[in-house]
Amino acid sequence: MVIRLGANQYGKAEVRVVAVDRSAPRHEIVDLNVSTALRGDFAAAHTAGDNAHVLATDAQKNTVFAFARDGIGSPEAFALRLARHFAGSYPWITGARIAVESYPWERIAVGGAPHDHAFRRPGGEVRTAVVTVDGGRAHVLAGLGDLVVLKTTGSEFWGFPRDGYTTLAETRDRILATAVTARWRCTGTDLPWDNLFAGVRATLLETFAATHSLALQQTLYAMGEAVLERFPDVAEVRMSMPNKHHFLQDLSAFGLDNPDVVYHADDRPYGLIEAQVLRDDVPADEVAWQGTPGFC
Ligand SMILES: O=c1[nH]c(=O)c2[nH]c(=O)[nH]c2[nH]1
């Protein structure tokens, strides 16, 4: 019986690189998911554990971040740069496959004008409604889920206590990103539902964009407060907002600075900020929330 190695490739999958162009007040953002795969003579690694030909997937990931320092441009151009680099890096590497997913971001409109540094990622958002009729009374929770938003500046996080396990550096400027899930309890059952939804959604977006954030908790509260201030038919807002961390990538090992340009969008673990913001003069209504899982 003869056993042999067939086709093979290897690389780093799903490198989440985000590059911010801050050269003008109107920031630009490129958000990619990059997967690398190298082809060539890697037989000895498979059959004998000999890694002499194996350009580490960790190095491939680093290359993606380092190349982003010069600006990413189009996904096609970035992928070509990377593929040509890898394919030309060692004689035994004969080819490279670079797959890129690019996530679009649209500017949030504030007062009708596109914002300079607050964005929304279209797609995936859902509108929700939960109606409970109980003992002849109807209760309405309107809501939305997965409204993905990001600010490239206007967010700080500092002043927190430092116990023996705290390593997080204080920051006066960071990327703030989250996916908003919100439900708002309505006091009526005969409301202009579509208008109310559009208004609450616009208020959530505008407030996220316009609030200079000292914590995601503060942004969440400001969003709920703005909804309650603008919409008297809303008694209560409950929100769940993951802190989608964007870590500045350290490029110093490659002789590169990184003046807030290249970030790693980490998908987990994530902070999860959840709260209820309510009108004090409206009685609580737990029946409305019964059976609605999680925080909201
Ligand atoms: O806005 C934030 N709130 C936190 O509670 C927190 N914790 C953390 O590590 N980063 C952040 N950011």
Image: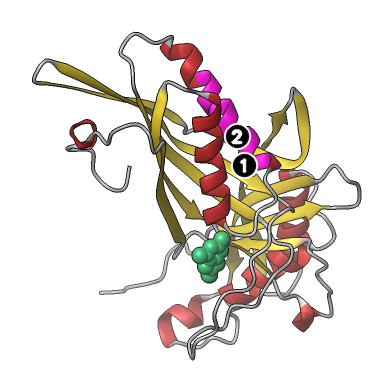
State which region is magenta. Answer: 198-209
In the rendering, which numbered label is found on residue 6? none
Query: Quick one: quadrant of the C terminus?
Result: top left
Horizontal and vertical percent position of residue 217? 52, 55
Image height of 134 relative to 287, above or below: above
Q: Is residue 202 above or below residue 66?
A: above
Label 2 crowding class (10 Å Cα cut-off): few <14, some 14-19, many 20+? many
Circle 1/circle 2 CB separation < 8 Å? yes
Residue 163 horizontal side relative to residue 47, left or right? right
Q: Is residue 221 visible?
A: yes
The front one of 244 and 154 is: 154
Q: How many marks?
A: 2
What SS does tag 2 mark? helix
Q: Residue at x 31, y 48 (%)?
A: 295
Amino acid type, callout 1? Phe
**Is residue 97 in the magenta section?**
no
> Is disc 1 placed on a helix, strand or loop?
helix
Query: Would you name the residue on which mark 2 appears?
Result: 205
Q: Amino acid at mark 2?
A: Leu
> x, y percentage for residue 22?
85, 53
Classify residue 282 as left or right of residue 21.
left
Could you tell me if residue 10 is visible in this image? no
Location of mark 1 (residue): 208
